[in-house]
């Protein structure tokens, strides 16, 4: 029996609409008068896409295919793990399946009730008591009142907040509120459960409790769709996995295989690029880029990097004719598009000396424990100092993923949620402590 | 596969459809949610207030007294031999319900967009929360109606049997307009600003502080196109009896206009509720 059937589903988003610039001074007035009509068109265009538009190359760059022709079927009782880099379409897929947003094309069919856990504490209101919030949240997530009545004691027991059950949630500590919210989620009994990364919060002990509870859900014949960056949880909970990239499911297989592909995704997330044919390589007659890649200290290429490890960004280029002072440099860009840092070849020999023809391999070593978890992109540039030009500028030439699954590289194992910031250096912290007694003496 | 699976309802999720109204069966399935949402709304509104639900009495009472003093007393508005205080009471109470329901329904999608991005349930629930939730203070304020009726010793007549119809219309009129405004407010944020202004003016287009007899006969056919008119006149007729005959023309016009708005609005709402998460 199929619990879930997804047929050719695509979801498109329109990126920022460009607005016309004024030609004459009368234009703003005309535009003001036309505004209501334009507004109407603009909003329509946010969710309507004509066929011509999708086929013409010009408009394509402002259309984002969050999902691109996704099809699959899930048997009832299967526990599916969805894996992929940020922006691969995992969350969009969950939102389409849970009816939060409609597909632009294609059809999904779900059999039975579906609950979707996208955040912790959906429907919670600080003014309501714990008891009222249990009912509120459960019914928002699709349960009936009598079902909550039957499970009520179990939920309270699981959350461990029985003493405060009739206290408004605004008086709870954040930990208590999260436990209560999780307790509600763990006791939902829909036929299909959709879970998006909600396990990233809460303390480790409680997370383990929830994972256990959820693996029982799977055994009860419930269908679960589970998105997580926690590969251990995926392998442990799921029978089957989908690897997503660029809005498509690129691999469908056993959870272990999917996790393996994702972790060793060097081949998938082009962390290594090589130009075998010199005529196609970036550059000009004087210098050509032949290879860019991520290497580790042992010299091995890697696409998934542990935040503990030191990595190097390696460029290989051929100098074809003598007569230029060439400085290669690299820029590392975060997944949100921010230039994190640039570094230029600091080798004194080549600061003013011409490079002789031949093959050069340069590696920029990135200090360990600097980068935040997530995808990073590399821009590789060659600068010709004397002639004031750049033989090549390769944007996003490679990308690599930094993994810090437990947050241990920065001592954040207990952190609720992911720490913010574009980089996440492991800093050396020092503490000076003066006891209270000493302080008082010092004041005297 | 086991036997139980066969009975499981199937849900088909398709791209934004052009036609089709609100799925009432689905809304009914989520009735427990509706109940708790109403409960939450009341609790949050009245929690930590000294008066609690007494505010549902104080607000209309103050308005009635204000109108009676300003228009009945100072301006000496003619009540055609009827009791002005009684007339105002019987209009302010349904009007309070209708204006707060219209206000609430027209903004329900915009104010709840964050929740809608997190979880699915029939979006029409938000409309019904307003329609039924506002009934609670309305029912509480019937204390005022009863007190005033007793005080002036107004006998009830058979016209009171029209009350269920009038009450139903009272709930449907703001819903029928609100369902349109809620959908439009997603597209045009100006609606929110404009609504506040319109709401304040709307009271003058409805016979709350005056009687509709004041409207010239040849204008009445246009006047009653405002569906609120029929409700207010109907409400007065129910309680005032033969002294204030039932105005069938306004009641029927109101019913027809409300039905048209409600059906067309629910089709439009059905389309907009699906795209709201992408548009907002």
Image (cartoon, coloured by chain):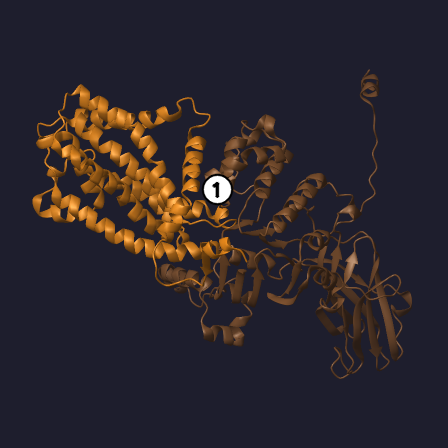
Chain colours: A brown, B orange
Q: Quadrant of residue A330?
A: bottom right
Q: Is residue A100 in view?
A: no
Q: Residue furthest right?
A: A349
Which residue corresponds to the image point at 33% horizontal and 38% vertical from the top-left? B100
**Residue A411 location in percent, x, y?**
78, 43
Residue B84: x and y in percent read 16, 27
Q: Where is mark 1, residue-wise? A: A139
Q: Nearer the viewer, residue A228 or A152?
A: A152
Residue ID at (76%, 68%): A380
Label 1 CA crowd tier, 10 Å (few <14, some 14–19, many 20+): many
The percent position of residue A366, horizontal first and vertical second, equals 82, 58
In what element is the residue under mark 1?
helix
In the image, taking residue B139 as reference, residue B157 lies left or right, namely left
Specify the quadrant that holds the N terminus of chain B. Answer: bottom right
Q: Nearer the viewer, residue B261 or B39?
A: B39
A323 w.r.t. A235: above or below: below
Specify the subunit that label 1 lies on: A
Q: Is residue A264 left or right of residue B149?
A: right
Q: Nearer the viewer, residue A340 or B112?
A: B112
Farthest residue in the front direction? B3
State whether residue B1 appears in this view: yes
């Amino acid at each position: 029996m199929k619990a879930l059937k997804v047929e050719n589903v695509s979801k498109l988003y329109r990126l920022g609409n460009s607005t016309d610039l004024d030609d004459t001074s009368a234009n703003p007035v005309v535009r003001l008068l036309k505004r209501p009509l334009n507004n109407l068109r603009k909003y329509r265009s946010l969710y309507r896409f004509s066929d011509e538009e999708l086929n013409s190359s010009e408009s394509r760059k402002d259309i984002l295919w969050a999902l691109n022709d996704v099809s699959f079927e899930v048997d009832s009782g299967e526990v599916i793990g969805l894996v992929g880099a940020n922006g691969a379409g995992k969350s969009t897929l969950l939102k389409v399946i849970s009816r939060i947003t409609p597909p632009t094309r294609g059809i999904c069919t779900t059999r039975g009730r579906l609950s979707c856990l996208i955040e912790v504490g959906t429907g919670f209101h600080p003014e309501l008591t714990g008891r009222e919030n249990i009912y509120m949240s459960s019914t928002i997530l699709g349960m009936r009142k009598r079902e909550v009545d039957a499970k009520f004691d179990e939920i309270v027991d699981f959350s461990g907040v029985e003493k405060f059950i009739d206290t408004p949630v605004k008086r709870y500590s954040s930990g208590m509120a999260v436990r209560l919210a999780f307790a509600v989620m763990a006791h939902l009994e829909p036929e299909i459960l959709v879970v998006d990364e909600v396990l990233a919060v809460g303390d480790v002990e409680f997370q383990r409790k929830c994972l256990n509870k959820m693996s029982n859900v799977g055994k009860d014949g419930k269908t679960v769709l589970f998105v997580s960056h926690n590969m251990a949880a995926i392998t442990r909970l799921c029978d089957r996995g989908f690897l997503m990239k660029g809005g498509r499911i690129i691999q469908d297989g056993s959870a272990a295989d999917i996790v393996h592909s994702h972790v060793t995704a060097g081949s998938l997330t082009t962390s290594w690029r090589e130009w075998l044919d010199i005529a196609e390589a970036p550059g000009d007659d004087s210098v050509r880029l032949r290879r860019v890649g991520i290497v580790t200290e042992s010299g091995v290429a890697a696409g998934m990097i542990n935040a503990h490890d030191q990595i190097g960004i390696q460029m290989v280029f051929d100098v074809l004719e003598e007569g230029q002072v060439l400085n290669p440099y690299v820029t590392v860009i975060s997944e949100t598009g921010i230039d994190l840092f640039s570094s230029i070849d600091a080798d004194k020999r080549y600061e003013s000396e011409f490079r002789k023809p031949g093959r050069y391999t340069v590696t920029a070593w990135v200090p360990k424990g600097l980068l935040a978890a997530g995808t990073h992109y590399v821009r590789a540039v060659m600068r010709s100092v004397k002639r004031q030009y750049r033989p090549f500028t390769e944007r996003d030439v490679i990308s690599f993923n930094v993994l810090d699954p437990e947050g241990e590289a920065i001592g954040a194992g207990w952190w609720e949620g992911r720490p913010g910031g574009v980089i996440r250096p492991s800093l050396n912290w020092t503490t000076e402590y003066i006891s209270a007694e000493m302080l008082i003496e010092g004041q005297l | 596969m086991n036997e139980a699976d066969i009975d499981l309802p199937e849900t088909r999720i398709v791209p934004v459809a052009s036609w089709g109204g609100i799925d009432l069966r689905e809304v009914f399935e989520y009735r427990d949610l509706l109940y708790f949402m109403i409960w939450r709304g009341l609790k949050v509104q009245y929690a930590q207030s000294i008066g609690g639900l007494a505010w549902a009495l104080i607000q209309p009472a103050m308005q009635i007294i204000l109108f009676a003093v300003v228009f009945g007393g100072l301006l000496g508005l003619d009540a055609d031999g009827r009791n002005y205080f009684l007339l105002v009471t019987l209009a302010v109470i349904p009007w309070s319900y209708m204006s707060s329901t219209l206000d609430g329904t027209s903004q329900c999608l915009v104010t709840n967009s964050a929740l809608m991005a997190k979880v699915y349930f029939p979006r029409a629930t938000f409309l019904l929360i307003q329609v039924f939730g506002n009934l609670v203070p309305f029912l509480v304020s019937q204390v005022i109606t009863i007190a005033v009726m007793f005080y002036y010793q107004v006998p009830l007549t058979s016209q009171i049997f029209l009350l269920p119809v009038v009450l139903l219309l009272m709930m449907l009129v703001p819903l029928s307009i609100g369902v349109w405004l809620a959908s439009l407010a997603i597209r045009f944020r100006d609606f929110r600003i404009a609504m506040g202004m319109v709401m304040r003016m709307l009271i003058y287009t409805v016979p709350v502080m005056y009687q509709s007899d004041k409207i010239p006969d040849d204008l009445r056919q246009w006047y009653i196109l405002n569906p609120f008119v029929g409700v207010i006149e109907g409400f007065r007729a129910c309680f005032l009896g033969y002294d204030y005959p039932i105005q069938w023309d306004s009641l029927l016009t109101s019913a027809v206009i409300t039905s048209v708005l409600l059906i067309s609005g629910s089709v439009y709402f059905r389309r907009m509720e699906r795209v709201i998460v992408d548009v907002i």
